[in-house]
Image (spheres, rainbow, N blue to C red):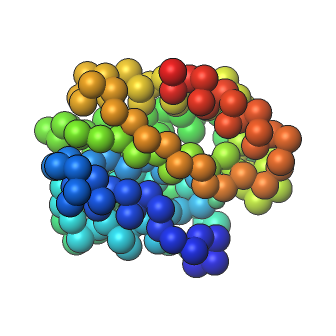
Amino acid sequence: MGFCLFGNVALAAHYARQVHGARRVLVVDWDVHHGNGTQALVECEPDIHFVSMHQWPWYPGTGAATDRGPHDSVWNAPMPPSLAPEVYVDALESAIDAATTGFVPDLVLISAGFDSLASDPLGGFTLELEHVVRLTEGLVQRAESWCAGRVVSALEGGYAPDQLGEACVAHLAALG
Ligand SMILES: [Zn+2]
């Protein structure tokens, strides 16, 4: 829908399954926009579970909670802007836990969009660096129990350059 030339994370999910022998892949998208392209590219594969938390209503207008995809393998968490940051963290972690109930991923892919941080010009979420760290560490801990810690993160949105840089450093440090 205009932000991406290629659906990098969706391509990675399919490539991991087809070339590297991964069977089940979890994609977690915390970019402030719904990952509509990713969803479109993975929702027909029931062994790829997709979790997206995004501002709602907001561009691109997709990603209702009732949109579970044709195989119920999509967990959309649409959220209003300007809530306390802990609310977003809890909502995303709840969706991750729902998406992995009875589904143990071999690989976790993160659509790491940092336009979900406070003061980003394109988003109304309120996350700070500490919440990026908490979300990252939570996923790493889960991945350690699921699949020996296999996590791959891809940078997505983020439109305040200094803040984006700080978020990347915090995220990378928390990935270990
Ligand atoms: Zn975005």
The image quarter containing residue 173 is: top right
Q: Is residue 107 visible?
A: yes
Residue shown at 59% from the left, 30% from the top: 172
The quadrant of the rendered image in which ligand 1 is seen is bottom right
Q: Is residue 153 above or below residue 174?
A: below
Q: Is residue 141 left or right of residue 154?
A: left
The image shows a total of numbered marks equal to 0
Residue shown at 51% from the left, 21% from the top: 176
Q: Is residue 24 visible?
A: no
Residue shown at 43% from the left, 65% from the top: 38
Residue 25 at x, y percent in the picture: 27, 48
Q: Is residue 48 left or right of residue 55?
A: left
Residue sitting farthest toward the bottom = 1
The image quarter containing residue 174 is: top right
Q: Is residue 74 left or right of residue 169?
A: left
Residue 81 at x, y percent in the picture: 68, 51
